Amino acid sequence: MQAAVNIQSHLQSTLSSRYRLEIMMAIKLKPKTYGPLVARLDSGRVTVQSAPEQVLAISSPPGDDAASPVEILLAAVGSCLAISIAMAAEQMKLEVGRVDVSASGTRALDLPHRVGQIEAFVTLESIPDEDTAKQLLKRGKELCTVSNSLNVPVELSLA
């Protein structure tokens, strides 16, 4: 009986490995690296340089000429969602025109300090029917690298 169990276990393991291999082969994700970004704190103000001509000013609290780190996070989520929704619309062969995303965050009420929730309101220049719009938002969220990288719920809804 023990031999039969071992063979069955080996077969299940082999089948599972083959199945995982087929799934991994079907997905074909391309590796991508980001950065390096250089963040420099000097006199209470951070500057981030991402390319020779691109410098972003960050401060906490935010000022007239600098955003806070959390505002930069929200900008990253909003811009990535806008790009991803536009990509999803193209894949779905939809003409939605301009895509606006308004992202806001709420600080968590417990420790550690973090954003506990992000809400993103999407405005489309041309809105498809409600079911198609829901599918578009779902696909856009699935494509968004930034929101998928966060360990917080990111809720999307049409504005």
Image: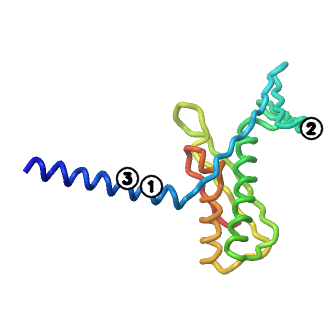
Which amino acid type is marked by label 2?
Answer: Glu
The reply to whether dot 1 and dot 3 touch (C-beta < 8 Å) is yes
- Image colouring: rainbow
Residue beneath label 2, please? Answer: 53
Determine crowd level at label 2: few under 14, some 14-19, many 20+ residues with C-alpha closer than 10 A.
few
The reply to whether dot 3 and dot 2 touch (C-beta < 8 Å) is no
- x, y (%) of residue 120? 67, 56
Q: Quadrant of residue 157?
A: bottom right
Which amino acid type is marked by label 3?
Answer: Ser
Q: Nearer the viewer, residue 87 or 72?
A: 87
Determine crowd level at label 1: few under 14, some 14-19, many 20+ residues with C-alpha closer than 10 A.
few
Q: Residue furthest bottom?
A: 129
Residue beneath label 3, please? Answer: 17
Q: Which type of secondary structure does the marked residue at label 3 adopt?
A: helix
Instruction: Write the residue at 76% across / 69% down.
Output: 124
Q: Which callout, 3 or 2, points at the residue further toward the start of the chain?
A: 3
Please state if 119 lies on the left or on the right of 151 as rendered.
right
Q: Tell me the tag on residue 21.
A: 1
- x, y (%) of residue 53? 92, 37
Q: Which callout, 1 or 2, points at the residue further toward the start of the chain?
A: 1
